[in-house]
Structures are given as C-alpha cells and as structure tokens.
Image: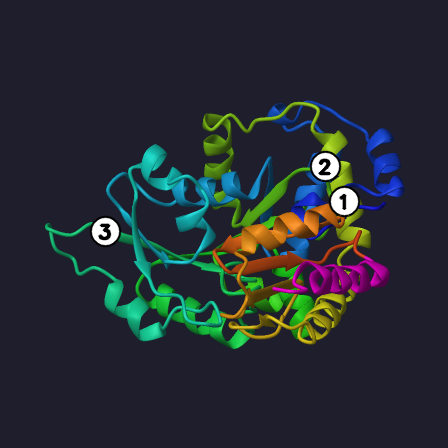
Amino acid sequence: MKLIDLRSDTVTTPTEEMRQAMVAAEVGDDVYGEDPTVNRLQEMSAALLGKEAGLFVPSGTMGNLLSVLSVCNRGDEVIMGNLGHTFLYEAGGISALGGIFAHTLPNQADGSLMLEEIENAIRPDNIHDPITRMVILENTHNRCGGTVLTERYTREVAELAHRNHLHLHLDGARIFNAAAALNIDVKALTEPVDSVTFCLSKGLCAPVGSVVCGTKEFIKKGLRVRKMLGGGMRQAGIIAAAGIFALENMITRLREDHQRATLLAEGLMTVPGIHFEIGMPQSNMVFLSLKEEVIFSAQEVAERLARLGVKVGVVAQRRFRLVTHYWITDKDVDETIRAFRSALSGA
C-alpha cells in the first residue's frame, strides 16, 4: 500500500532528474566563494526575485535568523505577526542568539498585519524604548491557512516601513506558491521588500536549502552571519544543483498542487463531521476541523488515518493541516477523502 503523506510539502523527495543533476554538479569550496553551482543558484535566485544578490543557506529558519541579525543590534525590536513562523517555529532564535525583541501584532485572517497597528507599534525616539528596526511579513502564511498576501498590500507595508526608515523582510518560504495563486510574476511580491527568504525544499522538491536575497551590502553582512551560525558549507554545489533544477522545472507546476488542494477540500466537505472554519484553500494547504458531534480528537482521527495509509498534520485539538505537493496525485486525493470517510464513520 502506498503511503500518502500530507503532513507537509517538506516531505517531498527529489525527482530522478533532480538526482541526476546533483550527481553531475560541478563543485568547489563555497566558503571561498568558489563553488560555481552555488554561485549560479544565488545569481538565478536574485534575478528571479528582482534583487541584487542571493545567499544559499541550509534552511529557511537560518535564512530568517540571518536576515534579522544582519539588520538589528542587541536590544533592537522587530515587528511581526503573532502567528508568524519566526515567532512560533524558529526556537526564539532572534532573542536567544541576537538579543532582539519580538513585538508581535495579531495576524488577520488573511495573514496580514493591519497597517495602522504596524504604524502604532513603531517606537518613538525615546531612551526608554528599544529601537524598532524591522518588519517581517510571511507569504504564503502558514498558520492562517496558506493564505496569500497581495502585491498591493506588500507595497503598502513597504511604503510604511521605508517612510519610517525600517527594513522590511519577507519570509517567503512559499513565495512561489503565492505568485502562482495570484497568477503574477513573483517579482511583484518581492521587489517592494528589502530582503526575502524562500525555500527550495518544500513545494519545489529539493532535498535541502533556502536562499536569502537582497542588496549586495545586505548579503555581504549575511555572509558573515551565515559563517557565524555554522552555515558555511564547502562543496555545496551538489545540493545547489537540486535548487537550480527546482527553479527551472518546479515553479510552473505549483498550480497543480493548488488545484489538488481545492479538489481535496471540496471532497472533504462531503464527509460528515468535517467543516472548514478558516475557509477554503488559497494555495496548497487545506485546514479542516472536526464538528462538535465528532467524539474523536484530531489526534485520534489521525491515528486511524495512518492505519489506512494516510498521514496528516494535527495542528490543534480538533484541526488538521493537509498539504499537497509534487508526490500527491489525483488518485491520492480520492483515497484521502475515502480514508477520512472511513475514519469518521460511526463517529
């Protein structure tokens, strides 16, 4: 029986063609700046996102941490959402390693932060206050349901930030999903921001890695911070080759994942005991909840599903997250709907 793994798009494995690209990769010492494949990946990434330079890092968490540490000093403050990845899922790195204070604002249902609240959160020039240095947005927004921030909203936040001399960083782990959902060039979502991190190892199917993009000056600072954090890799072209293949071949097919997420949600709507508290999917994430009449918890249902060959993410006592990706087929969608129906039968 094939295992259908919908816990995350991080479970994706390289395609055979991607593996062959890794085998054939030309390599050098990247800490010396001499790995031609890493250099090409960084240049491609910057060009795609409309930035001057890029920096290959082992993970998106390191990319976000590196970005904050490259801008902020100890005791400075960063404005971010209370449901944002940097606040919830990055082990408090900006505080533990940078002595940087997180000023959280409530994320709206669409993943945005209210412009008025951002402006009100910016500290005055007062010796009693930390210095506000940065704003962080997330697109697509994980905890808000894979929601998509628009080009217009991103530009509005950028204008506000720059008017107040703040650096705007975008956690764009799934920024190509956002662009696919909006059917626009990804540059429209990244050009307004000062720096952006995106992941190669999620929907783009690479086995490891993220890229940070920004100005040459910002990336120069980031290079030093990457070394400090232990992210200086040597013959990293082997994994960078997978990233190049991903950028050349995986971006245009992300709409297929979104379409399957919609089909999955529509099918699950017909299963008794399920409802969609936070709405239908905008990208490749499906968030669904158990109705009050269901006697099982989400964890119990997940265990039943696992026995039927379907793995799902449990994100709350009665809520699931299902993420479609390259290795999920139309047949898998149908099987998942049947598995939920079976797991909830008699509930």
Give how far apart the Cα atoms at labels 3 and 1 are.
39 Å
| Residue 130 visible in the displayed image | yes
Instruction: Give the main secondary structure of the magenta stretch.
Output: helix
Question: Residue 25's spot in the image, x, y percent?
Answer: 82, 31
Q: Is residue 99 above or below residue 275?
A: above
Is label 3 in contact with label 1 (beta carbons under 8 Å)?
no
> Residue type at mark 2?
Ala
Kindly indicate the quadrant of the structure image that contains residue 136: bottom left
Q: Residue at x 40, y 66 (%)?
A: 107
Q: Residue at x 79, y 65 (%)?
A: 256
Nearest to N terminus: mark 3 or mark 2: 3
> Residue type at mark 3?
Ile
Quarter of the image containing the C terminus? bottom right
The answer to whether 270 appears left or right of 97 in the picture is: right
Q: Residue at x 21, y 59 (%)?
A: 123
Considering the numbered disc 1 on the image, is that residue within a helix, a strand or a loop?
helix
Considering the numbered disc 2 on the image, is that residue within a helix, a strand or a loop?
helix
Q: Which residues are magenta?
A: 329-347
Counting every numbered tag in the picture gives 3
Nearest to N terminus: mark 3 or mark 1: 3
> Residue type at mark 1?
Ile
Question: Residue 199's spot in the image, x, y percent?
Answer: 62, 48
The residue identified by callout 2 is 240
The residue identified by callout 1 is 244
